Each structure stands twice: as C-alpha cells, then as structure tokens.
C-alpha cells in the first residue's frame, strides 16, 4: 500500500508537469509579413496604367491591403518604376484612433534569395491618412532583368513586413494572385449592367440596385446621394459582390471595374475605374467622392434629366487569388 501511495504521488507530479507545459505555450512571432505573389505579371502590364489592389489581409488585429503600380513615374524621370503603398482598410479606421505602424516593403529574389528591401518606414494611419506614401521600389526594367531573380517564369512576389504595430500582432499571412491574359480569355471580356433610376430625389442613403449577375457572380450597386459621410458635397458609389457568391473564405477575385453615370444628352459620361480584389473580408469597393453633387445636377452635363439618371457598371474578372 505504501508503494501504491508513492506511485500515485509520482504520477500526480508528472501530471502537473504536463499541465504546466500546456499552460505555457511558446511566445508568438513578433514580426509578421504579408506576401503577395503575382502570376502572369506581363498580363498586368498589358492592362491600363494605374493601381492594382491586393485582397484585404489581417495583421495585428487590423485589416490592410497593398496597392501596386507597376508603371509608376517620377517627376522629370522618363523611367517607369514599380511602386507599392500600404493602406489601412476602412473597416479598421476609427475617428479617435491613430495606428502607428513600422514596416518595410520587399521584392522577393526567387533565384538567389537576395531580396530587394526598402528602408524601414514609420507611418501614422488615421482617418485623414489611411494610406502610406508611395514608395518607388525599383525601375521596371530592373525587375524584368533575368539576372535579378525578381521575375521568374512570369511570376514575381512583393511583401510587407510589420516591425511594430500598436495592436497585438498575429501570424503571417500570404496571398498568391494569378492575373489572366487579356486576350482569348472569356472571363476578361467586360460584362455590363445598367441601373435606370426613375426618381433620384426619392433615393435613401444608401440605396441599392436590384441584384444582377455578371461573370457568374451576383452583384449590386450602392449609391449615397448625399455622400458616404453625408456631407452633401459628393455622391458616393460602390459595387458589392454578394457574400454568398464568394466560394471560400481564403479565395478572392481580382476585378477590373468601370462605373459610370451616363450622360443622357450630348455630354460625356462621368466614370471611375479600378482593379480590386473582392473577398469575404472586402465585398464592396467604390468611391466616396464619385462625383460632385453640383456637377451631377448641372443640366448641361445631362446626368440628371428631371428626376431620372442612369448608372452603368462594367465588370471583368481578370484574376483570382488564394491565401496560403
């Protein structure tokens, strides 16, 4: 019986040791990164100049996205540059909060591991400044050199590493984006929906179009007649993909969108274009300041005839991505 008691005590001691091990997990990794791999990079270059937006990713409890311009320019310089911006998603912007983030951008060397690294940057993200400054990374010609290792088999990878954020940090996030060729791809052909509004002055803020289907996905247009911030100076317009139409929480669609308020007279349409990734974290993209309300109501432009107006959405799904 004595041996039994001793054995029991020994067993209990081991159990305590196991419990202590479980209760003391390893510390989380302090630095977190987001890697954005783009397959079919040449197809991205074939598109109109401008910024392409990554999917929304979460790091340090906040939502962010990257903006890439592969054909950026500098004043007085004829060269084209590959540029990146870091943007704090509107979902994480608080009017009474300043998010201080220290980070650096990368272009990954896929052959030799000698990544092109930008100097460390510190930026305060807030309501009046949700985007970092543009960083001209390297000349486009340098990125395309075979010896650089940046562009391999028409694929390149960009990244941002967060050194310090005011919020708690989380694990790394990675995305791979595939951009389809512009020609001979049925999914690259824009499809169009037209929303005829009979009485603009009867619209609520926001008001939504009927659901419509383009490229096998269901969408709707939202309009804020007095602006998203209700300041009464601008009309805000957004395009939303129905959440139930997004197949998986880790997937996203790269969409080229062209939204226009049609001129019903001899004037020109007023439109905005963009390339954005629609995912479960970001189902809606658009413009807070789509058009000045004063310009919209100006009879000479033909946007508003009596009470009628017309909004056109042109959508092309040009790529897809998946978090890894």
Image: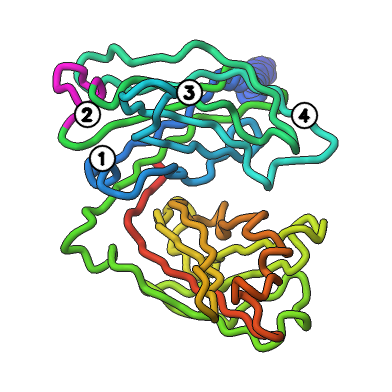
Q: Is residue 303 visible?
A: yes
Taking the spot 67% from the left edge, 24% from the top edge, the residue there is: 23
Residue matched to label 3: 135
Q: In terms of sequence position, does the residue under pointer 1 or pointer 3 come before the other?
A: 1
Assess whether mark 4 and mark 3 are in contact (beta carbons under 8 angstroms).
no
Quarter occupied by residue 117: top left
Residue matched to label 2: 151
Residue matched to label 4: 98
Assess whether mark 1 and mark 2 are in contact (beta carbons under 8 angstroms).
yes
Q: CA distance from mark 4 to mark 1?
A: 35 Å
Taking the spot 45% from the left edge, 59% from the top edge, the residue there is: 248
Quarter occupied by residue 209: bottom right
Taking the spot 53% from the left edge, 45% from the top edge, the residue there is: 56
Q: Is residue 150 magenta?
A: yes
The magenta segment is 142-152
- In screen coordinates, is 25 left or right of 47? right
């Amino acid at each position: 019986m004595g041996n039994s008691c001793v054995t029991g005590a020994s067993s209990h001691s081991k159990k305590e040791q196991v419990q202590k091990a479980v209760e003391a997990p390893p510390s989380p990794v302090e630095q977190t990164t987001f890697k954005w791999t783009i397959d079919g990079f040449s197809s991205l270059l074939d598109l109109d100049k401008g910024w392409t937006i990554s999917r929304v990713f979460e790091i340090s409890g906040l939502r962010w996205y990257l903006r890439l311009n592969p054909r950026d320019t500098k004043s007085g310089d004829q060269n084209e540059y590959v540029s990146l911006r870091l943007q704090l998603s509107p979902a994480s912007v608080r009017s009474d909060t300043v998010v201080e983030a220290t980070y650096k951008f990368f272009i990954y060397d896929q052959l030799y591991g000698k990544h092109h690294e930008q100097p460390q940057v510190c930026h305060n993200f807030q309501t009046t400044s949700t985007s970092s400054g543009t960083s001209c990374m390297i000349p486009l010609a340098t990125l395309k050199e075979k010896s650089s290792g940046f562009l391999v088999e028409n694929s390149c990878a960009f990244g941002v590493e967060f050194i310090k954020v005011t919020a708690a940090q989380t694990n790394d996030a990675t995305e791979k984006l595939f951009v389809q060729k512009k020609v001979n791809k049925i999914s690259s052909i824009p499809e169009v929906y037209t929303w005829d509004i009979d009485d603009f002055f009867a619209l609520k803020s926001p008001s939504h179009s009927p659901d419509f289907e383009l490229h096998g996905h269901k969408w709707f247009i939202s309009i804020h007649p007095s602006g998203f911030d209700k300041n009464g100076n601008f009309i805000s317009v957004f395009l939303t993909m129905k959440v139930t139409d997004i197949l998986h929480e880790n997937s996203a669609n790269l969409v080229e969108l062209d939204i226009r308020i049609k001129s019903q007279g001899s004037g020109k349409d007023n439109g905005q274009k963009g390339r954005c990734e629609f995912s479960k974290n970001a189902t809606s993209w658009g413009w807070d300041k789509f058009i000045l309300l004063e310009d919209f109501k100006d009879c000479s432009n033909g946007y508003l005839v009596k009470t009628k107006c017309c909004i056109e959405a042109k959508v092309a799904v040009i790529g897809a991505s998946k978090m890894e």
